[in-house]
Image (cartoon, grey):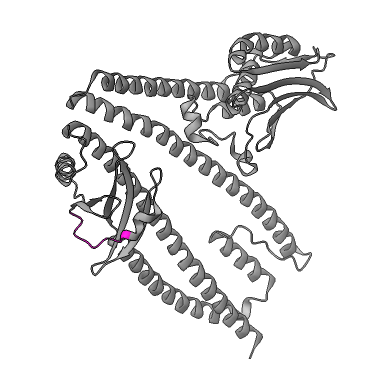
Amino acid sequence: MKFSWKICFSTIMLSLLIFSIGGYVLISALFQSTYEREVANAGEENRMLQYSFVAYWSATIQDVNLSQENVKTTADAMVDGMSGSELRIRISDEQGQIFYDNAQAELDAGLLETITKTTRGHMLRKTENGYELQTASMVCLGEEQFLYLESIREVTELFEERDQQYSIYRQWLVGLLVAQSILCYLMATWLLRPLRRLSRATRRIAGGNLSVRARMESRDEIGDLAVDFNHMADNLEQQFQELEDAARRQEDFIGSFAHELKTPLTSMIGYADMLRTTQVTQEEQFQAANYIFKEGKRLESLSFKLLDLMVVKNQELELKLVKIRWLAEDIKGMLSPSLKKLGIVLKVIVEDVMLMIEPDLMKTVLLNLLDNGRKAIEGGGTLYLLGRKEEGGFAIYVRDTGKGIPKEELSRITEAFYMVDKSRARQQGGAGLGLAICAEIVKRHKGLMTFKSIPGKGTMVRIFMELPDHRET
């Protein structure tokens, strides 16, 4: 067999392997991503049903007796109140007694054994007509009374769409192999020539494989062209990677921002609607209004922090020489009274050095870092604000004796809206923007901010900045 034919056959087989595996992996990954979204949506739907059942129970049932009649009355009111959606639910107690069932399906009771009062479970069920997603959670009606709430979500269309994609892909793959066989037959005799190698590399880059480089086999004009081509491919791959990173960060920012708005707004609308449509006690009215007020203040704080982030990125800094010890002592005077009430000691040891900074912005950085350290300390501890000359510049350290940050989280903590402990951060009024603002301010000062943390022992933040050249000042 001629070597050109070997190249042709090996190219066809390699392409078949890559496209087959790659295509099926891609379709499977897309299906898995869509299925996970369906699971998340089913969980959110079950959670809303759980809250709605408790709300309808409180609004319609005066008797605390956990009877089938009371449960059915509440469930009917909830289903009627959610008109426009076909709810399929089943409600039962811990003994397995079914109080309400309009699921029209034989549900798996084993799912109930996997859930607790704080968690919910789900499982995929294959039926005669397709697939259904069963989600279950516990509805607590008091300290001792609880029910199991199971909901059904139809996902047959998701699996049918996946099968259709597989079918289309197989047809496309067959057509691709036929076309490639013809092209390989016509081009096989030319593949060993340097110029054709360079052309093939160009086509592969155009197809998206930016790691391809041309092989330089001679030092004539074609060799020079291969060198120039490789230089172009290096720059193109770097720029493409930068664009991908920027797009990912922008997508993450938009998704996180939408989530930060959606969660409080949904709750605020729900509480406001409850106040508008339901007869509630004065205490419940106060609690609902208080929650709306707190979430409104959190949204206000979020908007101000976003504005701060945009301003820091775009404004021109007016740097001036500032005694860093004076700045540290000023911060100590601001924070010591409030930290003392929490049983936290702030120790400040800073060398008397002049730095070229924007004092208000640098104060914002140190206050944010110290505030993060305060939030990490539970039951009293110590905060350190240190500053000393080091080789090549001046280093500022902010260290706490708190609970620390897991190693896998450290690389992302300066991303906008990223929070290590989301529930705790939101309870303390955080939105995941403080460290993003700090990182941008330090960057604008041409400094470097790094983090070291040991879970259970604390976190240390180091800000390194160059010392000013006094000959120029």
Total tally of numbered discs in the picture? 0
Q: Reply above or below: 271 against 454.
A: above
Q: Position of residue 372 (x, y in %)?
A: 59, 25
Which picture quadrant has residue 186? bottom right
Q: Is residue 293 left or right of residue 98?
A: right
Q: Is residue 426 left or right of residue 87?
A: right
**Residue for point 42% across, 59% down:** 32
Which picture quadrant has residue 48? top left
Q: Position of residue 104 (x, y in %)?
A: 18, 59
434 within the magenta span:
no
**Residue for point 53% across, 21% down:** 311
106 within the magenta span:
yes
Q: Position of residue 102 (x, y in %)?
A: 17, 54
User: Relative to the observer, which residue lies in front, 383 or 75?
Assistant: 75
What secondary structure prevails in the magenta region? loop
Q: Reply above or below: 147 against 169.
A: above
- Which quadrant would the C terminus be assigned to in this image? top right
**Residue for point 35% across, 19% down:** 293
Give, as a single range, the part of the protein colored magenta: 102-109
Q: Is residue 332 left or right of residue 42?
A: right
**Residue for point 44% across, 39% down:** 255
User: Relative to the observer, which residue lies in front, 326 or 381?
Assistant: 381
Q: Position of residue 427 (x, y in %)?
A: 46, 27
